[in-house]
Image (cartoon, helix red, strand yellow):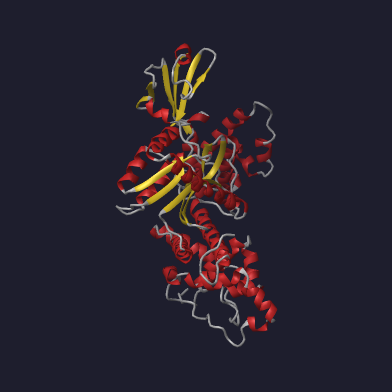
């Protein structure tokens, strides 16, 4: 398919808008479609995507029409089939995409899926995410139109669920084993299967094995399926090495076993295979909840009356907030004097604070309530991962560091702490026989940062940061990020990027509708 820029955007005598009444035309021009047609559609950079096409065959569907359709699809919460109908039949959508003068609209039921496939193939081949480049470019243009500076930015992360479910261990073993048995039976014939593997070809066997087990039978059945997994793997070794089902079984066995034995649950890594349908999804516990899938980071530039998301990242959910913060700090030049990044304490680390200071960036970490951190934490003596002394000079009789929760713990004599002059300020917990001090790395790092920020300014920055807490909610409720109908990190990132762009377009449309025509200043709602 050859690339050709969209030059058919001039209104003709047969334009569909000429068939509207004055009243209908007035409604159309006062809707979101007018702003989209004038402020968004012309800014889509078609040439950026020319590398997706060759010089042979018929011409492509106009890229700005495809990108615009993807944006409108998310804005209106439509499926691929519904946006196809809208592009073909809805005058409002056609007007926003400059299609009202086309005799035959160049759009089909495969247009969007083929374009997504080209984007994914190009990124896999080159490592370049063209869609993200376009999303961020449109964000920069929106900032210019609305006068939003990037001197004050704020960020937050959110867990994004994979479209697959997290399987129990027995179900995971059974699914991987049955899939490879099916491939082997199809290639060699079912008569070549060992007798104990024939049952995996029967549809009813899965429910009988997994869901109809009596209490206490799960481990016994797991051992049986594990033996069957090793058997089918041995039959396929060397001949089915390139088969996807074989690769998934091998990966699952590597994750779940060691030395020919099943691992204990606590020894299985979060990066282990969660579901064969989505091999990229990882497992993480956060804030007492279990998550299977991915994590996204959102960065907003804050204006007086509106904000624009001008950067985002999408990774496996084992990626930490501190790593996201490091990436954003490193994206600045060597001298970003005056830049402020506000985030929660999860992004804080000594290394990030040092890197930000080297680039003249103020990295401010706050809590949701805006309450000032407990600065007495800085008076505790800490050596490595251990609390070795308290502000009053007392030594704990025991101390340890919980790596899973990133929490420092120290145990003191109860009588000593009861008589301590710092008792009211110290985060000590009086138990029946002892006194316990515990605080997280996040709390400590926030205390370090609070020393550098004036109290009133800290509260103002906390108010600014709190505003981004609503973005994950919007992405879940309106843009359905937890139910994207695809599998895999690359596809999920692509869909997520379009949703981010749609959020910005919605904000741009809303802000320009509030704009005072006389002054050009965005007025408050």
Q: Is residue 347 visible?
A: yes
Foreground residue, 469 or 392? Answer: 392
Residue 414 image offset from top left, x and y in percent: 48, 13
Residue 180 is drawn in which quadrant? top right
Foreground residue, 26 or 482? Answer: 26
Residue 261 image offset from top left, x and y in percent: 49, 29
Residue furthest out toward the bottom: 13
User: Measured along the vertical axis of the image, is residue 44 above or below residue 334?
Assistant: below
Residue 461 image offset from top left, x and y in percent: 46, 45
Residue 404 image offset from top left, x and y in percent: 47, 31
Left or right of 283, for residue 204: right
Foreground residue, 54 or 63? Answer: 63
Left or right of 379, for residue 65: right
Residue plotted at (35% across, 53% down): 332
User: Measured along the vertical axis of the image, is residue 217 above or below residue 116?
Assistant: above
Residue 456 is drawn in which quadrant? top left
Residue plotted at (43% across, 36% down): 446
- Quadrant of the snapshot with the C terminus: bottom right
């Amino acid at each position: 398919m050859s690339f050709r820029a969209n030059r058919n955007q001039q209104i003709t005598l047969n334009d569909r808008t000429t068939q509207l009444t004055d009243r209908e035309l007035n409604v159309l021009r006062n809707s979101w479609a007018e702003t989209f047609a004038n402020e968004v559609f012309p800014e889509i950079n078609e040439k950026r995507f020319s590398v997706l096409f060759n010089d042979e065959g018929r011409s492509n569907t106009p890229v700005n029409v495809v990108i615009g359709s993807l944006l409108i699809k998310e804005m209106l919460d439509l499926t691929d089939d519904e946006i196809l109908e809208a592009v073909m039949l809805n005058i409002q959508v056609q007007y926003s995409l400059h299609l009202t003068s086309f005799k035959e609209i160049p759009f089909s039921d495969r247009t969007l899926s083929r374009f997504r496939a080209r984007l994914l193939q190009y990124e896999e081949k080159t490592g370049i995410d063209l869609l993200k480049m376009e999303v961020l470019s449109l964000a920069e243009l929106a900032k210019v139109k609305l006068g939003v500076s990037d001197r004050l930015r704020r960020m937050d992360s959110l867990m994004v669920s994979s479209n697959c479910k997290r399987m129990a261990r027995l179900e995971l073993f059974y699914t991987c084993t049955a899939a490879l048995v099916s491939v082997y039976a199809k290639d060699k014939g079912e008569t070549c299967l060992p007798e104990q593997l024939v049952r995996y070809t029967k549809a009813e066997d899965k429910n009988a094995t997994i869901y109809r087990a009596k209490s206490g039978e799960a481990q016994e059945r797991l051992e049986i399926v594990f033996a069957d997994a090793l058997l089918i793997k041995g039959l396929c070794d060397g001949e089915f090495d390139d088969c996807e089902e074989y690769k998934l079984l091998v990966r699952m066995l590597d994750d779940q076993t060691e030395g020919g034995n099943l691992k204990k649950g606590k020894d299985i890594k979060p990066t282990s295979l969660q579901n064969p349908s989505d091999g990229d999804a990882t497992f993480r516990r956060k804030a007492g909840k279990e998550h299977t899938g991915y994590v996204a980071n959102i960065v907003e530039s804050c204006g007086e009356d509106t904000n624009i998301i001008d950067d985002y990242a999408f990774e496996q959910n084992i990626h930490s907030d501190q790593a996201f913060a490091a990436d954003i700090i490193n994206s600045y030049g060597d001298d970003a004097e005056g830049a402020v990044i506000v985030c929660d304490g999860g992004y804080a680390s000594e290394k990030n604070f040092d890197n930000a200071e080297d680039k003249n960036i103020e990295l401010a970490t706050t809590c949701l309530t805006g309450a000032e951190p407990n600065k007495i934490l800085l008076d505790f003596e800490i050596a490595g991962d251990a609390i070795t002394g308290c502000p009053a000079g007392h030594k704990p009789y025991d101390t340890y560091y919980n790596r899973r929760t990133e929490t420092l713990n120290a145990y003191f004599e109860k009588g000593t702490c009861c008589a301590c002059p710092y008792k009211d300020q110290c985060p000590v917990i009086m138990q029946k026989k002892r006194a316990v001090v515990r605080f997280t790395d996040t709390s400590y790092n926030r205390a370090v940062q609070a020393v550098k920020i004036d109290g009133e300014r800290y509260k103002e920055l906390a108010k600014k940061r709190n505003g981004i807490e609503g973005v994950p909610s919007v992405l879940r409720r309106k843009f359905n990020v937890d139910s994207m109908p695809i599998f895999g990190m690359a596809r999920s990132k692509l869909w997520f990027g379009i949703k981010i762009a749609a959020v910005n377009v919605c904000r741009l449309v809303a802000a320009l509708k509030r704009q005072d025509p006389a002054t050009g200043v965005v007025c408050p709602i």
